């Protein structure tokens, strides 16, 4: 082969390669354009769904709220903290369903209001921070028989639980000068199976919170925070805590108390880039607390609104009376001054 022929073949190969690169780039450009349009369309559909659900709920009418205005009083002011977790909305057992959930949620508000009144006899309690610990809905994708153990579809869970969360937040706004809601999503809000390629924070709990927040826009002393991450920061004056669901630690969402506290100690020692005192979690449907290694902070585990959990009873030999948690916080010293386990079965 002559030098000319070799040069010709090399040039032909170069042109062919450049043509191929151009075609690949063009194909990639067209694919990205389709992806962009599809994403824009899905975002529009999701936004339209939220707006439609919100409009439907507002059309039904939401209870009007007269914001609470505290009376002047002596003493150091404290802040109420409600930790509400694991409502499992629409779960159906022999002793639990959506109507029982609603009764127990309002029973908690009644009891929290009475205890707040007792606290106010000694010092002001002007603010309330509501921590939502996740698994507020039951979901559909956690175990094979789950669709047979609910009394509402996933969409109805979304609307019904959001409506109840809004009712609870509105009642809190009528009891305190200022209410802040910090939500966290749980494993029951997962969309699809564990192997599905769905981002973790595309979670039905999170969607439920978004709808509830939209419903409460007319309440002037109520603020809802977002929850894009799976660990939320709680800050009340000088008091700092983490809010998690509880499935972040351990294998398949289960960990022993020792493992839970070890993780909290590691986070406290610098593994988590924020200085905090306490950790609030749910997930295990039982009420507990454990001291952390520094002798000051605690891991607070809160029970569930649900009762008669067959899975917990059979797989972990665990059962508990339905309860939720109420704390009072000194925002100046940054500590918990009082804690209550509110039983909700009666």
Image (tube, rainbow, N blue to C red):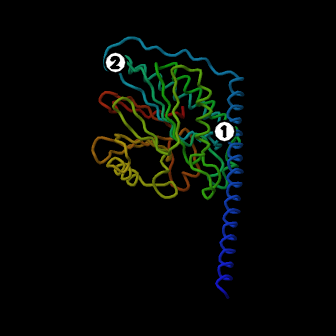
Q: Which of marks 1 and 2 is nearer the N terminus?
A: 2
Residue at the bottom extreme of this rendering: 1
Q: In which quarter of the image is the C terminus?
A: top right
In this view, the residue in front, 91 or 160, is 160
x then y, percent, for residue 47: 67, 36
In this view, the residue in front, 236 or 319, is 236
Badges 1 and 2: C-beta atoms under 8 Å apart? no
The structure residue drawn at horizontal position 48% and vertical position 25%, both measured from the top left corner, is 179
For the residues labelled 1 and 2, the Cα–Cα distance comes to 41 Å
The structure residue drawn at horizontal position 61% and vertical position 29%, both measured from the top left corner, is 214
Q: Dot 2, how many residues are within 10 Å of its Cα: few (below 14), some (14-19), or many (20+)?
A: few
Asked whether, in this view, residue 327 is left or right of residue 46, the answer is left
Classify mark 1: helix, strand or loop.
helix
As drawn, the label of residue 122 is 2
As drawn, the label of residue 157 is 1
Q: Quadrant of the N terminus?
A: bottom right
Foreground tag (1 vs 2): 1
Q: Dot 1, how many residues are within 10 Å of its Cα: few (below 14), some (14-19), or many (20+)?
A: many
Q: Taking 17 as reference, is 253 above or below it?
A: above
The structure residue drawn at horizontal position 52% and vertical position 29%, both measured from the top left corner, is 108
Asked whether, in this view, residue 134 is left or right of residue 52, the answer is left
As drawn, the label of residue 112 is none
Residue at the top extreme of this rendering: 72
Figure quadrant of residue 77: top left
Asked whether, in this view, residue 235 is left or right of residue 135, the answer is left
Q: Taking 37 as reference, is 338 above or below it?
A: above
x then y, percent, for residue 341: 44, 35
For the question of whether residue 219 can be seen, the reply is yes
x then y, percent, for residue 147: 69, 49
Classify mark 2: helix, strand or loop.
loop
């Amino acid at each position: 082969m002559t030098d000319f022929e070799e040069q010709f073949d090399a040039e032909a190969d170069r042109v062919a390669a450049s043509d191929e690169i151009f075609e690949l780039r063009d194909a990639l450009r067209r694919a990205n354009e389709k992806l962009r349009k599809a994403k824009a369309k899905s975002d529009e559909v999701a936004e339209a769904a939220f707006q439609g659900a919100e409009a439907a709920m507002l059309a039904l009418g939401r209870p009007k709220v007269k914001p609470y205005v505290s009376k002047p009083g002596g003493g150091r002011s404290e802040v109420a903290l409600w930790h509400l977790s694991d409502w499992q909305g629409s779960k159906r057992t022999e002793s639990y369903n959506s109507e029982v959930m609603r009764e127990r949620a309002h029973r908690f508000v009644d009891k929290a209001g009475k205890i707040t009144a007792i606290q106010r006899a000694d010092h002001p309690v002007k603010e309330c921070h509501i921590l939502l610990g996740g698994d507020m809905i039951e979901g559909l994708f956690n175990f094979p028989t789950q669709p047979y153990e609910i009394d509402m579809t996933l969409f109805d869970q979304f609307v019904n639980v959001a409506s109840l969360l809004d009712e609870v937040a509105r009642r809190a706004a009528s009891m305190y000068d200022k209410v802040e809601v910090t939500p966290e999503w749980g494993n029951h809000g997962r969309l699809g199976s564990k192997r599905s390629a769905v981002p973790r924070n595309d979670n039905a709990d999170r969607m439920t919170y978004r709808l509830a927040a939209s419903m409460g826009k007319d309440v002037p002393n109520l603020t809802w925070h977002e929850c894009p991450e799976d660990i939320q920061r709680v800050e009340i004056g000088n008091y700092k805590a983490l809010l998690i669901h509880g499935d972040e630690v351990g294998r398949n969402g289960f960990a022993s108390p020792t493992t839970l506290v070890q993780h909290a100690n590691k986070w406290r020692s610098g593994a988590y880039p924020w200085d905090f005192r306490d950790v609030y979690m749910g997930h295990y449907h039982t009420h507990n607390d454990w001291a952390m290694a520094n002798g000051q902070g605690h891991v607070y585990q809160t029970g569930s609104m649900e009762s008669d959990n067959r899975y917990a009873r059979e797989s972990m030999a665990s059962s508990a009376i339905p309860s939720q948690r109420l704390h009072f916080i000194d925002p100046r010293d940054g500590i918990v001054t009082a804690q209550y386990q509110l039983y909700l079965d009666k």
